[in-house]
Amino acid sequence: MASESTRSGEGAGTDRSAPVSALETARRQLEHAAAELDLDPNVVERLKHPARVQRVSIPLERDDGTVEVLEGYRAQHDDVRGPFKGGIRFHPDVSEAECIGLAMWMTWKTAVMDLPLGGAKGGVVVNPKDLSENERERLTRRFAEELRDIVGPNTDVPAPDMGTDPQTMAWFMDAYSVQQGETTPGVVTGKPPEIGGSYGREEAPGYSVAIVVREACKYYDRPVEGATIAVQGFGSVGANAARLLESWGADIVAVSDVNGAAYDPEGLAVQEIPAHDETPEAVTDSDGDAITNEELLELDVDVLTPCAVGNAITGANASDIQADLVVEGANGPVTFAAESILQQRRIPVVPDILANAGGVTVSYFEWLQDINRRKWSRERVNEELEAEMMAAWESIRDEYERRDVSWRTAAYIVALSRVARAHELRGLWP
Ligand code: GLU
């Protein structure tokens, strides 16, 4: 099964000499947006910190009988509007600071979508490609045991993220259910549909990226039909976004994965290219000229969608971006420094907390289905996703027009206002 967010494009086009932590970026974005609003400074101060971070060590028995001790985290940022919500990643770059920054983004993402959920993120410092399936299963079950006291359908609901997939969620749900003594599908989302997962969950982050690209194109008077689009990362997010956009008449002129990129100015046949997780060599074996990930990022296209990893566009390469519009498919692909440069160059950046929020939105639908023990059809999921995405897009567009700020600040204003209002109503201190 495909992992939620591709690892493809890793290291590509990134400024590894000056890595920027997700936490640093998230805090700077928060301060920047808070300055636009007349908020209680105590609430803003509170939101710079996670409510809790659980740090665990996980003994993993390898297939050869040796034991390795891995580090894992679950950062719970804010739950004022509902249970903590956010993915679990298996990736060598996972750190406590990264989990906290990503958890903050989840708080804004659920608030932008007006879902009754908060923000969290977890992860294990490991390269899942180095593990056998049995090792991944043992790791997931042990991680679920370590987190048992702090997760649950009414407290904190994990989901897939980089390096994890529906099978990972199935193991997590099973381990938790066995410990609880009852089948509890609502403890995680992104499960296979046969055991309480939602139809359309897997495609949802990519679909929401496509919907946001379509609306942003329309906003800038450039219909999606005939628009030229470069997609960095051809995992679940990038591949689903590219295929939907192509079906609407866009020309997907370039796609990439960790091995490199393919380019065809007339448009690639993306429906026929398997996602990176299905066939790792598919992008580089496809028709189209071979170019590098760096070259893909710098193509002169209508829309660039970085759907691979964080920090793809940094202060080092932002001046070379030629796209008219950037829509963030990955979490945090544009650093704070890069965004300032793009803003000076009048290249709008539509942020991740809106564009890839289809994932958590369909996670919410899945959670509702689990709680109600009632399955929705794929048509219903996609229709409701479209409606939720349009409502979020419209509220952000209104702030964008009213306040003359960046798209990201407009999205933060929508999210922060909702989170801060909930804190005000409930009271910051018990
Ligand atoms: N990992 C996804 C994200 O970053 C989805 C989280 C969820 O569904 O809870 O948005």
Image (cartoon, rainbow, N blue to C red):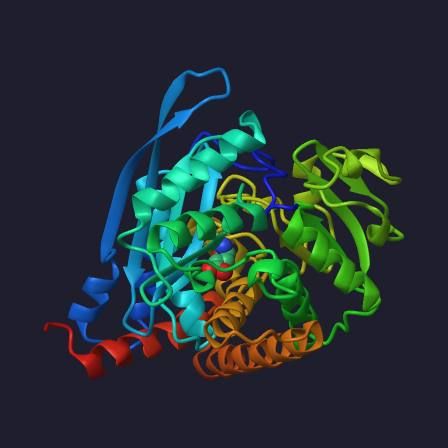
User: Can you say which quadrant of the picture contains the C terminus?
Assistant: bottom left
Using residue 21 as the reference point, say whether residue 149 is left or right of it. Answer: left
Residue 6 is at least partly visible in this image: yes
Residue beneath the point at 44% across and 75% down: 115
- Report whether 35 appears left or right of 184: left
Q: Is residue 82 above or below residue 188?
A: below
- Percent across and percent down for residue 248 are 81, 69
Marks counted in the figure total: 0
Q: Is residue 381 above or below residue 264?
A: below
Q: Say which residue appears at 33% left-offset and 56% top-offset.
A: 151
Q: Position of residue 61 (x, y in %)?
A: 42, 24
The quadrant in which residue 30 appears is bottom left
Residue 94 visible in the displayed image: no
Task: Locate the N terminus by quadrant.
Answer: top right
Residue 52 location in percent, x, y?
Answer: 23, 53
- Please, is residue 146 above or below residue 384 in the view? above
| Of 10 and 76, the residue lying toward us | 76
Whether 24 is drawn above or below 222: the answer is above
Between 277 and 326, the residue placed more toward the observer is: 277
Please name whichever residue, 257 or 39, is drawn nearer the observer in this view of the structure.
Answer: 257
Q: Position of residue 125 (x, y in %)?
A: 41, 33
Residue at left 67%, top 52%? 238
Location of residue 6 by image quarter: top right
Asked whether, in this view, residue 60 is left or right of residue 227, the answer is left
Residue lying furthest left: 430
- At x 67%, y 55%, the residue is 304
